[in-house]
Structures are given as C-alpha cells and as structure tokens.
Image: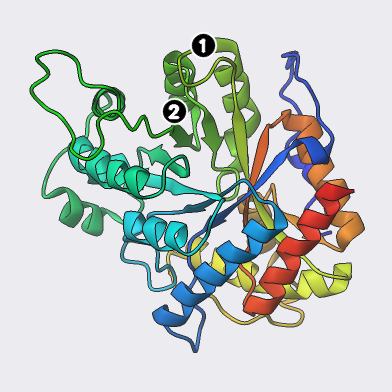
Amino acid sequence: MFLNVTQTISPLPGHNLKMIRKPLHEIDFSMLDLVPVREGHTVAEALGNMLSTARHVEQLGFTRYWLAEHHNMPGIASSATSVLVGQVAGGTRTIRVGSGGVMLPNRAPLTVAEDFGTLAELFPGRIDLGLGRAPGTDPVTANALRRDHMESVEDFPRDVEQLQRLLDMPKPGQQLVATPGAGTRVPIWLLGSSLFSAQLAAQRGLPYAFASHFAPAYLMRAIEVYRRGFRPSAQCEKPRVMIGVPLIAAPTDAEAQYLASSIFQRVLSILRGRRGQLPPPREGFLGSLTPGERAGIAEFLACAVIGSPATVRQGLQTLADETGCDEMIFTCDIYEPQWRLRALAIAADVKAG
C-alpha cells in the first residue's frame, strides 16, 4: 500500500481521550461525490455516473450519499449542490442524501433553509445539510459568489445559528420564516479541516465531519477537541464523528496502485496550482516523480486506503481504531466508472466481514 495510515494518524503525544473502538460492521459507510469530470468525457456523463453510483451504493447498504460544493473547477461538476441532491434523492429510494457540504459563506442562510426545506418536504426523512465555512474555490471566484461580502470570524457561527432557527418550528412573533423550511428540522452537520468547526460543532451539539480525504493534518486533534467539548443537544445526545477516506480498491494491490495513479496525478496538479479533469491512470507514475512530489501527494492523501480487499480491510480498521469514528465517508475517484462501482462493492464486502 502506498500510504501507511498507521503512521500518518497515530495519536498526538499525550492523547488519552477514551474512545469506543468499533469493528467495521458497526461503522456506517457513506459516499462523498465530487462528480468528477474525466478527461475525454463530458459533464453530462459525470452527472449520469453520479446517479448510477448513488443507486449502486444504496443497494450496497451505504448510509448516505453527499455532494460537495466546488466552483470554477473544470474537473468537478457538483457546483449546483442542492440541485444534485434533489436529482440523487429523486433517483433513489432509501439512502440519505445531502451536502458535503454547502459552503455557507457563499449563501444566505434563508436561501439555504428554503432549498433544503424544499428537499425535505419532497423527500421526508432523507435529507442532510452539511455546512462548511470555506469558499470552496479560488479568491476570484469567491469574490464573484459573495459579491464583495467580506467574511468575518463571527459570521459562520451566527449563520449556523440562524439556519437552525429557520429549520426549527417558528416561534410566536417570528418575523423571518423559511417557507418551505420551517419545521423540517433538516439535520445539520458541521464540516471542517481545522479546529474551528470542531469547537463550534461541540458547542452546538451537532455531528461533525472532518475533511481527512484531502486535509488530514489536524484529524486527531480536531476529533479530540470535538469530543472533549461536546454538549448534548436535541439533534445529538452524544458526539458523532465522520471521517473522509479516499478509497481505491481492486482485486490486487498492484491494480489498486495503478488505478490510484489518477488521483495521484490530480493531487500533483493541485499542489502545482493547476486544476484539471480526472486523468486516466498511468503505469509507473509515482516512479517518475521527485521525492518531494511523492511526499506532497502522501501528505495530501494521508488517510487514503488503497489496495486489495485484505489491504482495504486492514487500512479501514486501522482508521477506525485510531479515530474511534462512527462513520466513514468515501471519495472514490477512479477513472473508469465500472471500476469505481467495483471498489465500493469491495468496501461493502469488507464491512460485511
């Protein structure tokens, strides 16, 4: 396996927070789809692959299917997140569907409440609202989205609080009511890659998802901060932790390494300041890189699990043991759609034991 998760996410010095470690069959598996656009293929094909993947993981017993908001990126087709949530929910029957996440600085809380309140009325009991505080794009695009609005550190907590009020039952005399939205109580998750959202999720008693699929450096520290500071709420009586896991599974380690070269190429492009479409795999790609480039990819994908079923089982169990997570949400950016579906089926088989 290219990445050694046992070294990457080992507990911090002095880490002594008691965790309940679970076997894989007790951990929820979910899917985070960035709707990757492949080189030589179209956005329409990417959207079709999204729906077929959602139906596939629903049959596999996955808990939820989330779409990630990104903008001005030629290789990602999930910018209109709430639209895609509706498309996936309408094309499936039981799986929970939501945002992973809506980037709240780009949106007014009222419009988010109306969008997701509408989805909740259309698909009762199946909609999640994951919220992030990053723009999900570059500064130029962020400026175009925000129309010169300057975000302050106080804005995100205030907007989260307002969203909770708008999705709750209206109070007597409440002047601002989301219609649809009010009374739907769409479950809110906070997403993050640092300690800020971990602290806020703990304070507000919300479930917490850490973006370890691309920014794993603070994973263990954020989980500890969240669990130590958690205050029970009407939505959550106890902490609930989800971790992002890049997954590349195949019948053999060698094939998985080959398929993973697509995401290795994409990550290297990101590190170089370029963002393109998902490239096809390349034999011997890692061997063509400098040690520094390989180290940069390894740091970015430090929580990736890449390999055969046995390797995947070991890697996922290591992540579960180290983090005590309640749920894993997979990114699975494999160039050929059929091999992506196969990888997710391997994960489901591993979970089933």
Q: Identify the amino acid type marked 2.
A: Ser
Image depth: mark 2 or mark 1 in front: 1
**Image location of residue 36, percent across then percent down:** 50, 70
Answer above or below: position of 24 versus 345.
above
Residue lying at 49% horizontally and 32% vertically, measured from the top left: 194
**Image location of residue 292, percent across then percent down:** 65, 59
Q: Give the camera-side residue of 302 and 94.
A: 94
Most distant residue in the bottom direction: 40
Confirm whether residue 262 shows in the render: yes
Instruction: For label 2, count other residues whose C-alpha is less than 10 Å away and answer few (under 14), some (14-19) or many (20+).
Output: many
Q: Secondary structure at mark 1?
A: loop
**Image location of residue 269, percent across then percent down:** 51, 69
Residue lying at 35% horizontally and 50% vertically, measured from the top left: 122
Confirm whether residue 260 shows in the render: no
Horizontally, residue 340 falls left or right of residue 75, namely: right
Residue identified by numbered label 1:
232
Q: Give the camera-side residue of 45 and 126.
A: 126
**Image location of residue 195, percent across then percent down:** 49, 26
The tally of labels here is: 2
Residue 197: numbered disc: 2
Quarter holding the N terminus? bottom right
Q: Identify the amino acid type marked 1.
A: Pro
Q: Secondary structure at mark 2?
A: helix
Residue lying at 28% horizontally and 46% vertically, measured from the top left: 118
Residue 219: numbered disc: none
